[in-house]
Image: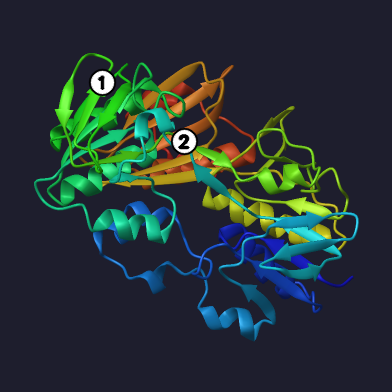
Amino acid sequence: MKDIVVIGAGQAGASLCAKLRQIGYGEKLSLFGEEVFPPYQRPPLSKKYLLGEIDVERLYIRPKKFYSEQGIDLNLNSPISKIDIRKKVIYSKGNSTSFDQLIFTTGSTPRKLPNSLSQNLKNIFYVRSILDVNYMASHLVEGKKVLIIGGGYIGLEAASVCRKLGVNVKIIEMDKRILNRVSSSETANYFRELHQNNGVEILERVTLDALIGETHVEKAILSDGTQMNIDLVIAGIGVLPNDNLASESGLDIENGIKTNSLGQTSNESIWAAGDCSSFPWRGKRIRLESVQNAIDQSEIVAENILGEKKSYIPSPWFWSDQYDVKLQIAGLNTGYDQIAVRKGDRDNSVSHWYYKSGKLISVDAMNDPRSYMIGKRIIESGNTVSPIDIENPEYDLKKLIKK
């Protein structure tokens, strides 16, 4: 095998290339990215990087010299304009590169506000890239007023950073509550109280009707009739998989680039991993947006490209940092029908244990790393623990580790 090409220089792309070299692939390996920066971590963008606590080099997944040392042809600022699957050639900036195997690790992109609302006004921000955050940071000045659209984790993380910088924050969420699609009401209540205690105003079941201004946003009109003067908008209304290029190339698409359990697309020479891919899991098809998925799936795909036949079975975990709270999530809570609440050993620490038909499927742990680790191990082992035991403060969680 020769000429492996990877499109998408993010966490998944970097992990896949590193894994290929680690397991002995010694032929030509090319990595293409649209940005001018080498592959970097995105989660710190809305946290430590936006706060100015780390510099840009600390975001890099690997030092830039790693790619040349490993013989990885890193092509930055090189968007792909076309793929000819029949000829096995990609085109970027007028140049062509042939491939034997092609992998999409193109990630995802933020949903944008409709033009009818944004009206091309300035000071509307999205959190996805280094350049996004650089531009936003220059506007987050003490005393400014920001409207955050979307009460998911991106919006809440942005709110916590804004408050630390002395910016006045209002969050609007169109759903019945914040975090409605991703967490229980117990977890949502915890974070609503946390943000309100830090001076954030949260409006639920409220949408944006209009943004008004000459060149920059100056005022927002909400569906409940509220009119508010604002200096900027941060939109955190979800992401979309970057699957346009794959779709234009004739590959099957289903909420992302459709793959089998090995990571193979509808073309046996083309693969996908990370945010952009949808794959089979427990009788359905899912797409995960997490560091864990980007790394683990891409490494499985690397092995399968070289002849292994390993199905990707994720062990999902996520995290979010807000103020002095670290949320750690193990598993997926889809379809849960019961919640068990366990108080932690410290103030403001608690864990919420999700059950489906009596089986533990997920844990949200707020400032409670021990509950997170124990819950994660139980879920990954396929075992469970009684919700009655979880809610009993006298029950020793260490018993579960011994079992």
First in residue order: circle 1 vs circle 2: 1
Q: Nearer the viewer, residue 91 or 201?
A: 91
Report the number of discs. 2
Please name the residue that numbered disc 1 is placed on.
222
In percent of width and height, residue 130 lies at 40, 61
- Frontmost of labels 1 and 2 is 1
Residue 386 vertical placement versus 298 (above, below) = above
Q: Secondary structure at mark 1?
A: strand
Kindly indicate the quadrant of the structure image that contains residue 197: top left
Report the colour scheme. Answer: rainbow
- Relative to 106, is 39 on the left or the right? left
Kindly indicate the quadrant of the structure image that contains residue 42: bottom left
Q: Secondary structure at mark 2?
A: loop
In percent of width and height, residue 45 lies at 37, 56
In percent of width and height, residue 132 lies at 38, 55
Please name the residue that numbered disc 2 is placed on.
238
Q: Amino acid at mark 1?
A: Leu
The N terminus lies in which quarter of the figure?
bottom right
* Residue drawn at (80%, 48%) of the image: 262
- Relative to 273, is 392 on the left or the right? left
Question: Dot 1 surroundings within 10 Å: few (below 14), some, or many (20 or more)?
Answer: some
Residue 257 vertical placement versus 1 (above, below) = above
- Relative to 286, is 178 on the left or the right? left
* Residue drawn at (74%, 56%) of the image: 82
The C terminus lies in which quarter of the figure?
top right
Q: Nearer the viewer, residue 276 or 157?
A: 276
Kindly tell me whether residue 21 is visible in this rendering: yes
**Label 1 vs label 2: CA separation?**
20 Å
| Residue furthest front in the image | 214
* Residue drawn at (68%, 56%) of the image: 298
